[in-house]
Image: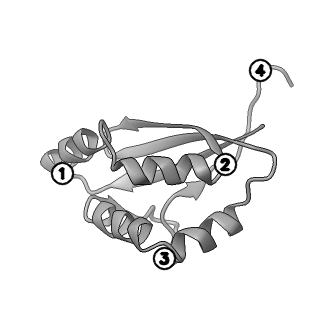
Amino acid sequence: MQRYCLTLDLKNDPALIEEYKRIHKSIWPDIKERILRDGIKVMDIYISGSRLFMIMEVGDNFSFEEKAKSDAADPRVQEWENFMWQFQQPLPWAKPGEKWMQMEKIFDLNW
């Protein structure tokens, strides 16, 4: 099992942020099924202000590249992503088209 941490910003609008939080209390069932089918075992999202932080735990065969290909080929996932984009904005250092960005682990209490 591997753990990844990712981050993304929301638009700094309190009403949009509250709506985003509300939507994530009951995401579309087929999107949840798809996340699980793609080998993601745990997905938690935290928020501080307008900054999101996602923790994902995935199976050993998980690949971000394969997930991206699979997502691009699924119209329902694309519908969800386009819907979410009205709330989200890229991090200042993101390249064009990048959304969730993987974070670098810099500390582990057990090192």
Would you name the residue on which mark 1 appears?
A: 16
Neighbour class for label 2 at 10 Å: few (<14), some, many (≥20)?
Answer: some
Where in the figure is residue 36, as x and y percent of width and height? Answer: 57, 46
Q: Are marks 2 and 4 in contact (CB under 8 Å)?
A: no
Type of amino acid under label 2 = Gly
Task: Give the number of the mark in front: 2 or 4.
Answer: 2
The quadrant of the rendering that contains the N terminus is top right
Amino acid residing under circle 3: Gly
> Real-space Cα distance between discs 1 and 4?
36 Å
Q: Which residue is mark 2?
A: 39
Q: Is residue 75 above or below residue 12?
A: below
| Picture quadrant where residue 58 is located | top right
> Which circle marks residue 109 in the picture?
4
Earlier-in-chain disc, 1 versus 4 = 1
Element class at badge 3 = loop
Q: Residues within 10 Å of mark 3 (few under 14, many from 20)?
A: few
Q: Nearer the viewer, residue 37 or 78?
A: 37
Label 4 sits on a secondary structure element that is loop
Q: Nearer the viewer, mark 3 or mark 4?
A: 3
Instruction: Please indicate, yes or no, whether residue 6 appears anywhere in the rendered image.
Output: no
Q: Quadrant of residue 63?
A: bottom right
Residue 111: x, y in percent?
86, 25
Q: For mark 3, what is the residue?
A: 97
Real-space Cα distance between discs 2 and 4?
Answer: 27 Å
Name the residue at the right extreme: 111
Is residue 105 rendered to the left or right of residue 43? Answer: right
| Residue 65 showing in the rendered view | yes
Residue 12 coordinates in the image, percent (x, y): 24, 52
Q: Quadrant of residue 4?
A: top right
